[in-house]
Image (tube, helix red, strand yellow):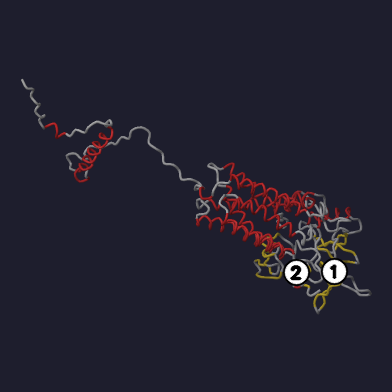
Amino acid sequence: MLAVLNHPKLDYDWFTTTLLRWSSEGLVVYDRWVLNFSGVGSYGHTGGEVLLDFYYLCYLIAFIGVLFFFTRYRKQGWLKVKPHVPYDALLLTMIGVLVGAKTAYIFIYNPEFYFGPPPYGPVDTNDMLRRIFLNWSGMASHGAAAGVMCMAILWWLRARPKVPIAQLGDVGGIAAAFGAIWIRLANFMNAELYGRAAPEWLPWAMRFPVRSGKGNQVVWHNNVLWEKMFKPEDPAQVDAWLQNLQQANPGGVVDQGAYVLFKNPDAYRQGYELVVRTSEGAQYLSEPAANTLYWNPLEIVTTPRHPSQLYQLVLEGLLVLIFLLILRKRVKRAGMVAAGFWIAYPVARFIGEFFRQPDVQFQQAGNELGTVFLGLSMGQLLSLLMACVGGGLMFYFARYGRVIADEPMYPPDPEKPRAKGPVSVTIEQGMGGSTGAGEIAGIENVRAALAEKEKEWAKDERPEGTLERHDDDQDKPEPDQPQRGN
């Protein structure tokens, strides 16, 4: 092995991706300091709800990117919409991404965590609602794409007049690729969704902290892997929670005060190493040394892995964004860029999945890698489905898409109401009368101009072939008629 890097969580005890947390002690900053009426103090790790972490921050940057791209292309004239439309698109995008990504994760990847029985499932209804609405760590990108498409279809169906949904989707695809860059960066910072085992010659192979499929830290204790599970914050739920743990695995629960160790044979099925922290730094062991006393429990980390989050950052984010920006300048029909995203993103995701560790929720004996069909991961299967939808969109817009140059402004300007019947003008007494106001206002000049205009209208209405007869001709005597000879 030329070099093995460590994720910052392993090298620095203070490293965390949680930026703001609200706990019973007060407002916690960076999981290190507590701000309350007593001043600034050290954080005692008493739990609480996360208000902002790096994951949420990256979502915020991604949504700002949506507003940026819509506003930029509107000002350039490529997107013909009024100034308020980008804000409408931003609101619907936020709803589609958050609801779609969370819904897909709940029902496809981890339904037991939200609806299953304890110990992994919620203790009661309140706990279930808290996990659904306050735990945004579980998100699925394919669900986000589906959610945005559903919101776009609803917008198109309800809008009167119809919104140019195809071209709005073009800009949305570009913004989605920009957002993918930040979301994958957040995955790396959180040390989640890491890659498969890396070959020995890979110089940037990296160790990551190990977690179970339920998100709990996995530790080594008495030659057995355990899950480190923190107790519920509500004291009224602790007894029922402990009883469920004992029923799920009698004798496999060790109470450690603020947390318990739960013996779970399915906690982790991949290669791992033990971490022994000494004054000289962290040491990594493939197995515990004989006749050596260790402080229990020990942390465990992955064997050297691909930093697949960074691979996906480049593949699904940067390269797809560059491709869509080039495609935007070449296509002439609306909807082609959006279709390009629905093809390029799943292709990039499909390739990236060969380096990414499949979700551990699908691991079982005989299938330690966690594939679901024909050696493919769940992400690859969803990518194939998404690419098929993108191919259909590309075929449709290539034949029936509206030319971008012919797109009208949305929403159109309201038509001015036309007067029905003859227009009457009321002239009040004194206007142009004996008061002389008419001479001052130029009413006499207007009357003269109207008289001349009436003459022109009369001439235009004269039948073709009729000779014009001037009033001056009426005063001239008719010429003498020739006399016949006698």
**Quadrant containing the C terminus in the rendered view:** top left
The image shows residue 333 at horizontal and vertical percentages of 57, 50
Q: Nearer the viewer, residue 395 or 21?
A: 395
Point out the tag, 2 or 1, that comes first from the N-terminus. Answer: 2
Q: Is residue 239 above or below residue 298?
A: above
Q: Is residue 187 above or below residue 390?
A: below
2 or 1: mark nearer the eye: 1
Secondary structure, mark 1, is strand
Please give left or right for residue 373 compared with residue 339 in the image.
right
Q: Nearer the viewer, residue 195 or 454?
A: 454
Q: Is residue 16 above or below residue 353?
A: below
**Quadrant containing the N terminus in the rendered view:** bottom right
The image shows residue 454 at horizontal and vertical percentages of 25, 36
Secondary structure, mark 2, is helix
Q: Amino acid at mark 1?
A: Glu
According to the picture, the residue beneath numbered tag 2 turns out to be 9
Assess disc 2: are there few (<14), some (14-19) or many (≥20) residues with their C-alpha within 10 Å of its C-alpha.
Answer: some
Corner quadrant of residue 182: bottom right
Q: CA distance from mark 2 to mark 1?
A: 15 Å
| Residue 21 visible in the current orientation | no
Question: What residue sits 82% from the left and 56% below the top?
Answer: 370
Assess disc 1: are there few (<14), some (14-19) or many (≥20) residues with their C-alpha within 10 Å of its C-alpha.
Answer: many
Q: Amino acid at mark 2?
A: Lys
According to the picture, the residue beneath numbered tag 1 turns out to be 273
Indicate which disc residue 422 carries: none
Please give left or right for residue 123 compared with residue 321 in the image.
right
| Residue 309 visible in the current orientation | yes
Q: Is residue 139 above or below residue 158?
A: below
Q: Residue furthest bottom?
A: 280
The image shows residue 410 at horizontal and vertical percentages of 51, 47
